[in-house]
Amino acid sequence: MRLIGFKFTKISIERLNSSVPIENLKVNTEIDVPEIKKINLDAVEIKGETIELRFLYKIKYEPDFAKVDLGGQIIFSVDSKTAKEILKEWKNKKMPEEFRLLLFNIILKRSTLKALQLEEELGLPLHMPMPRFKKEEK
């Protein structure tokens, strides 16, 4: 399985309510895959099959403080057997475990980096803790 392409098709970040104390915020993250399909890429010669999927990555700061919505498209090159398995399971809105883990890790890595950049630009608290140096205790 080979990653051929990744692009964001939707980038939205919005501060909804500035009066909520930061200490009371809860951050929820959600990944959704609404579509998986086989495609043909005529411009590129690829062995096997080409699978395209769309994803949504959402971060909600509760209670109604802010939200980050990222959407995108990922294209994989897979062998014919794997493509058939993925598309067969997708008919029931499921994915093979190995593919799902690979996919979600790619989405999580790329979307988290983009979300952190956007949160910094908008002055939102980061949705995940950053590494910090601490004074060594004796």
Image: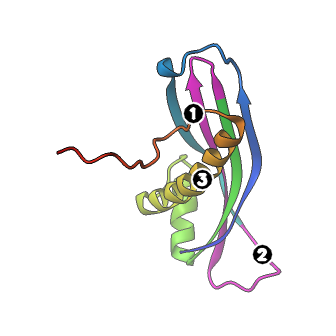
Q: Is residue 34 visible?
A: no
Disc 2 and disc 1 in contact, CB within 8 angstroms: no
Determine which residue is flagged by label 3.
113
Q: Amino acid at mark 3?
A: Leu
Residue in view at x 48 percent, y 41 percent: 128
For marks 2 and 1 on the same chain, the one whose residue lies earlier in the sequence: 2
**Disc 3/disc 2 C-alpha distance (Å):** 28 Å
Q: For this view, does 122 lie left or right of residue 28? A: right
- The magenta segment: 39-66
| Percent of width and height locating residue 69 | 68, 38
Q: Residue 32's mark?
A: none
21 to the left or right of 132: right
Check residue 13 for magenta coloring: no
Instruction: Name, please, the residue furthest toward the left.
Output: 138
- Horizontally, residue 76 falls left or right of residue 122, namely left
Give the residue type at disc 1: Pro
The residue wearing badge 1 is: 125
Q: Residues within 10 Å of mark 1 (few under 14, many from 20)?
A: some
Of all residues shown, which one is farthest toward the front?
138
Callout 2: few (<14), some (14-19), or many (20+) C-alpha neighbours within 10 Å? Answer: few
- Of badges 2 and 1, nearer the viewer stands 1
Q: Residue at x 71, y 36 (%)?
A: 122
Q: Nearer the viewer, mark 3 or mark 2?
A: 3
Eyeballing the image, is 60 above or below 133?
A: above
Image spot of residue 70 (x, y percent): 69, 44
Magenta region includes residue 64 = yes
Distance in Å between CA atoms under marks 1 and 3: 14 Å
- Secondary structure under the numbered disc 1 in the rendered image: loop
Seen in the picture, residue 125 relative to 83 is either above or below; the reply is: above
The disc at residue 41 is 2
Tell me which amino acid carries mark 2: Leu
